């Protein structure tokens, strides 16, 4: 088997959304592997959160609490600088998505298939984000101002502005999915043509650094779109 054929076979295997089990209602609801892994991530993050916030103190906080407050405070300040004071209500969502996408991209290191390799998962994230983006504009401007925004700066470009409602989620979805899948393809190529030890430093980049970068890019663009929608 040639390198191209082997790579194509592994790529098809990676793109295959295996059904883990089926819920026997409404004719059967298939539950894909990406959904099950997402449940595992949610459970792990919930347990970690419960452990992290135990025994918090107002006075004389311990080192664990100080580190936790520094991380959360830093994230709040970062996103507040991006979306401004009026967008603070959306910061918890942005932090939650950043943590989830980061965990989803890194979970492959312990043997699970990252949910972000499933186009359905990235599409769901993008749809929820774009709904929040449009809600932010509607909440800030009111219905009249929101609808009027489609005709700005001139009415003739209203169809283009309306088209953006579909382009933005597609852009968010395909950027995340494409970069995660692209990193997989590059790593598989390196493994096929290089000595066993050579892929290790590349794995540190594509499996860890690149995964975190994609989480950052996703929430960064979402935050910018929210601010743009409110302006």
Image (spheres, rainbow, N blue to C red):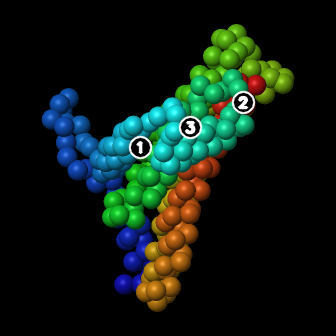
Q: Give the residue number, with chain letter if any, for mark 3.
A: 94
User: Mark 1 or mark 3: which is in front?
Assistant: 1
Q: Residue at x 68, y 17 (%)?
A: 140
Q: Residues within 10 Å of mark 1 (few under 14, many from 20)?
A: few
List the residue tagged with mark 2. 84
Label 3: few (<14), some or many (≥20) within 10 Å? many
User: Alpha carbon of mark 2 to alpha carbon of mark 1: how far?
Assistant: 28 Å
Helix, strand or loop under label 2: loop
Q: Dot 2 surroundings within 10 Å: few (below 14), some, or many (20 or more)? A: some
> Quadrant location of the C terminus?
top right
- Please tell me which of labels 2 and 1 falls first in the chain: 1
Q: Quadrant of the N terminus?
A: bottom left
Residue 52, labelled with which disc? 1
- CA–CA distance between discs 3 and 2? 13 Å
User: Which of the pair 183/156 is nearer the observer?
Assistant: 183
Contact, mark 3 vs mark 2 (Cβ under 8 Å): no
Nearer to me, 78 or 113:
78
First along the sequence among labels 1 and 3: 1
């Amino acid at each position: 088997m040639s390198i191209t054929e082997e790579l194509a076979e592994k790529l098809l295997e990676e793109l295959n959304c295996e059904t883990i089990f089926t819920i026997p209602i409404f004719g059967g609801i298939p539950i894909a592997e990406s959904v099950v892994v997402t449940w595992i991530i949610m459970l792990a993050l919930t347990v970690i959160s419960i452990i992290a916030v135990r025994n918090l103190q107002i006075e004389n906080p311990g080192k664990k609490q100080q580190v936790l407050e520094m991380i959360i405070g830093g994230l709040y300040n970062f996103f507040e600088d991006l979306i401004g004071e009026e967008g603070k209500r959306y910061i918890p969502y942005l932090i939650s998505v950043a943590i989830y996408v980061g965990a989803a991209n890194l979970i492959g290191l312990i043997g699970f298939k990252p949910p972000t390799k499933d186009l359905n998962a990235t599409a769901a994230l993008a749809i929820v984000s774009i709904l929040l983006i449009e809600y932010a504009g509607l909440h800030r401007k009111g219905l009249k101002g929101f609808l009027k925004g489609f005709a700005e700066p001139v009415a003739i470009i209203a169809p283009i502005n309306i088209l953006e409602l579909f382009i933005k989620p597609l852009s968010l979805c395909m950027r995340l999915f494409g970069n995660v899948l692209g990193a997989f393809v590059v790593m598989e190529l390196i493994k096929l043509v290089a000595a066993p030890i050579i892929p290790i430093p590349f794995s540190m980049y594509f499996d860890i650094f690149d995964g975190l970068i994609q989480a950052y890019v996703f929430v960064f663009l979402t935050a910018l779109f929210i601010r743009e929608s409110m302006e």
